[in-house]
């Protein structure tokens, strides 16, 4: 533990809840995470971060006499996970510089946690957020200096539109301005703003089924329905019959559909196209959920569609499948 760990996690949060402001922290001493496990637990515990939809090991600690310990220095507090070589489950924790003590059950769940005010708040709110019985935006607005609350908002950002997120951003404490979670929120805001109705649709050039390259700008002059999807997405596949009907009804009426898949296996993409009878333009974007096109179009779930006019301007976005045909029919008429 030590230098490698410190370097990997030196980018996280600076400040916790405002109610901690008067509390002595001893933050210059770094953090100490001490865990107590039931008898019989052996092996290693891994400290991980979740980045780009993957868990990345930052450090490991041996279980010795029923305990494991991680130490290091954080530039900013943030959310991490711990998992063990004996269990596949992960425990989420909010770490900041200072002590954090926890007891773990046989099922690799937290029986008891004691740490900073914000670490304890995060632990209390985890099951509440998972059940959907509390709203992340309300939690954050009630705690506008809380990086843990901002984490919850970012994880549930797909629930909010641009205007709501913009309003929330204006009410957050300036103490969060340099925080990586704030950067994440602002990046999402910028992407959402860039694809609002009335904005010019971002161009892309992607490989087709035949291996050629198709650019969006080359299709100017007709209405476009850009549909982001994947073969492994159940809702996308359920929408296929509606898209097939849409294509048949409007293919000769100045409407072109462009399917943009984020499949990472070309064979699965091609099989889905054939099986579902998707007889319109199809391209594939590399990188899965981290693809440049998903970022450019602020795609937060699948399927997501954009309706673009002949001048390349976005007319509508995220149209419900049940409304696709009547909305496009009204537009073209």
Image: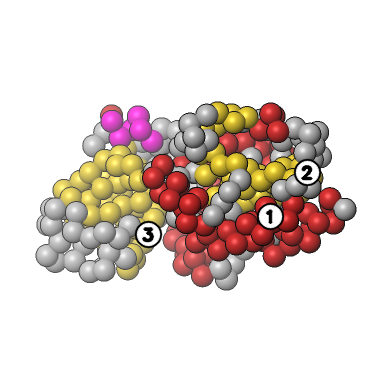
Point out residue 59 in the picture as x, y percentages from the top left corner: 26, 40
Compared across the picture, whether 120 is left or right of 249 comes to left
Q: Which residue is mark 3?
A: 114
Q: CA distance from mark 1 to mark 3?
A: 61 Å
Q: Which residue is mark 1?
A: 248
Point out residue 113 in the picture as x, y percentages from the top left corner: 36, 61
Q: Answer whether residue 269 is visible to the viewer in this image.
A: yes
Q: Between disc 1 and disc 2, whose residue precedes?
A: 1
Camera-nearest residue between 20 and 93:
93
The answer to whether residue 226 is magenta is no
Q: Between disc 1 and disc 3, whose residue precedes?
A: 3
Against 3, is 230 above or below?
below
Q: Which residue is mark 2?
A: 254
Q: Residue at x 52, y 35 (%)?
A: 208
Dot 2: few (<14), some (14–19), or many (≥20) neighbours within 10 Å? few
Q: Residue at x 50, y 61 (%)?
A: 234
């Amino acid at each position: 533990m030590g230098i490698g760990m410190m370097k990997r996690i030196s980018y996280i949060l600076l400040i916790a809840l405002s109610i901690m402001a008067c509390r002595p922290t001893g933050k210059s001493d770094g953090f100490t995470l001490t865990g107590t496990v039931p008898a019989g637990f052996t092996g290693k515990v891994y400290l991980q971060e979740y980045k780009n939809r993957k868990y990345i090991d930052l450090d490991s600690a041996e279980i010795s006499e029923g305990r494991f310990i991680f130490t290091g220095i954080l530039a900013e507090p943030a959310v991490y996970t711990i998992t063990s070589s004996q269990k596949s489950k992960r425990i989420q924790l909010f770490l900041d510089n200072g002590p954090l003590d926890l007891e773990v059950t046989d099922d690799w769940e937290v029986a008891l946690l004691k740490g900073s005010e914000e670490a304890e708040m995060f632990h209390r709110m985890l099951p509440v957020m998972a059940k959907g019985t509390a709203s992340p935006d309300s939690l954050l607005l009630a705690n506008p200096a809380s990086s843990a609350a901002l984490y919850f908002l970012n994880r549930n950002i797909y629930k909010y539109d641009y205007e709501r997120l913009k309003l929330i951003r204006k009410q957050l404490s300036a103490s969060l301005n340099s925080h990586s979670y704030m950067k994440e929120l602002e990046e999402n805001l910028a992407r959402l703003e860039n694809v609002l109705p009335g904005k010019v649709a971002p161009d892309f050039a992607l490989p087709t089924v035949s291996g050629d390259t198709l650019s969006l700008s080359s299709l100017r002059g007709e209405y476009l329905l850009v549909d982001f999807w994947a073969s492994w997405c159940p809702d996308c596949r359920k929408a296929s019959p509606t898209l097939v009907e849409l294509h048949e009804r409007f293919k000769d009426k100045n409407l072109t559909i462009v399917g943009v898949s984020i499949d990472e296996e070309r064979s699965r993409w091609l099989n889905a196209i054939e099986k579902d009878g998707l007889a319109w333009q199809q391209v594939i974007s590399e990188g899965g959920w981290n693809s440049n096109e998903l970022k450019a179009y602020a795609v937060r779930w699948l399927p997501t569609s954009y309706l673009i006019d002949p001048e390349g301007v976005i007319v509508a976005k995220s149209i419900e499948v049940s409304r696709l045909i009547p909305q496009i029919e009204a537009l073209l008429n």
